[in-house]
Amino acid sequence: MIQQHRTVAILCAAILLIGARHDDAPVETTEAIFLDFLDADSAVGVIDSGLYAQYQGQDRAAWDRKRRDRHQVLMAQLTAIDPLALSPDDAAAVAAMRVTLRDHADPSAAFGSDADVPKCSDAGRGDLDYAALRAALVGCFREIGSRLQFENGTIDRGTALQLLHDLEESARRKALFDAFRPLWSALNGNNEADSPYRRLIRMAAADAAKNGSQVDAAARAIGVSTDEVERWLVQILDAWRQASEPGMVEPWDYRHAIGEANRLLAKQIPAAALVAVNDCFYRDLGADLGKLGIVYDLAERSDKSPLAYTDFLARGRRVDGAWHAPVARVVGSYPVGGLFSLNELVHENGHAVHISAIRNRPAFMDWPDTLFDEAFADVSSWSVYEPAWQRRYLGTEAPEPMSLRALHGNVVLDVA
Ligand SMILES: [Zn+2]
């Protein structure tokens, strides 16, 4: 028996030595592959957004091949890591990578080329899975939401929402609201049980039951239960109800009803001033947006997302001992200016500054979490509703109650 034990011990030592020669820092190696995967995924993302036809000299097909390859290797590496052999720091790093990867669908099931990405016209197909149906509905926003028909011209969704605060004539506001109808019917048909949107909601519920929901994750992030969050949301809506006029408001008049501050400040916030005001504010906060190398996708383009967003273009990484900071990409369309647009642009730049500042080991080079990310961006963007801020950056101010109504009126739409 003793001899047998010794043989086993020698064998184990040999395996450990082979393992050490093979890769004595498996988590470090895995993290490097993790970064390469995320960067390839971001490259596909920027090409799909329509901003670039190629990124760093490679086309979509090349980046897609790379992200599939890196993902496959990454998953094999993660599977091979023995969790019991990890230091607490490495265990946390592996856990963080797994969380990030849950948010990135397996690219082997993703769309290999532009032509494979579902279009809005695919939304009625019953054979699409959750990811494909989601992509088809995003396609509806891009294809229809960028080109709403209004007063003999076209207008994008974000600009239409801005204008609903500003237009003085109710009939024009109703016409603008009605311009959304083609988008709504592409998403939700006639609200029949098997409309694309209702099928998507059922798939989202099934996915949440299996993998957990974003709502649960948000509640966990602040250490409360989902039920508690729901109670807060109801309290917020109730407080808004108490603070609002009791009469009914038509949906096309709602933003006008809360938008007095937008109209009062409209002249001070022309489209041409947005970027300069935003830059100046962040410089005062200590963030020089130009020096951060943020890539801005603000020009109008027919295939552009009508929803503003910010994402990584490249993750931060150490190269030959020198730190290369992350590069953020901001997408938005602001052809008419105004307080609503300014809030959104400052919000997106809050995200851009946040992710530009992430400096950590590769496993933690992702958005930290959804809830605090959004809250972080709102800390700077909600400043635009402060009279002192408006005085400093716009040269005039709206009364505080008027500004807060403009701010919270849009917040309660999210709450609802
Ligand atoms: Zn945001």
Image (tube, rainbow, N blue to C red):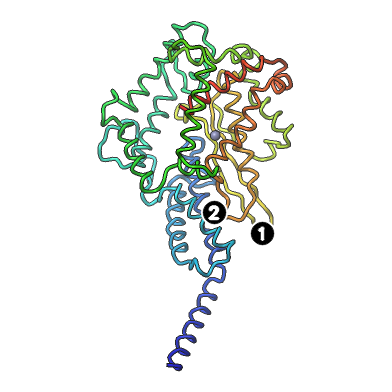
Looking at the rendered structure, the kind of residue marked 2 is Leu
Q: Secondary structure at mark 1?
A: loop
- Quadrant location of the N terminus in the rendered image: bottom left
Residue 354 in sight in this render: yes
Residue 351 vs residue 139: left or right? right
Q: Is mark 2 within 8 Å of ligand 1?
A: no
Residue depicted at x 71% and y 36%: 288
The picture quadrant for ligand 1 comes to: top right
Residue depicted at x 57% and y 39%: 373
Image x and y of residue 371, in percent = 54, 39
- The image's mark for residue 309 is none
- Label 1 or label 2, whichever lies nearer to me, is 2
Residue 123 position by quadrant: top left
The residue closer to the viewer here, 121 or 368, is 368
Q: Secondary structure at mark 2?
A: helix
The residue closer to the viewer here, 74 or 63, is 74
1 and 2 marks in contact (CB < 8 Å):
no
Residue 292 vs residue 213: left or right? right
Looking at the rendered structure, the kind of residue marked 1 is Asp
Q: Report the residue marked by disc 1.
A: 320
Crowding at dot 1, Cα within 10 Å, few <14 / some 14-19 / many 20+, comes out as: few
Residue depicted at x 59% and y 37%: 351
Q: CA distance from mark 1 to mark 2?
A: 16 Å
Image x and y of residue 141, in percent = 41, 28
In this view, 79 is above or below 306: below
Image x and y of residue 310, in percent = 55, 36
Q: Report the residue marked by disc 2.
A: 35
Residue depicted at x 31% and y 32%: 198
Image x and y of residue 115, in percent = 35, 39
Residue 116 in sight in this render: no
The residue closer to the viewer here, 59 or 323, is 323
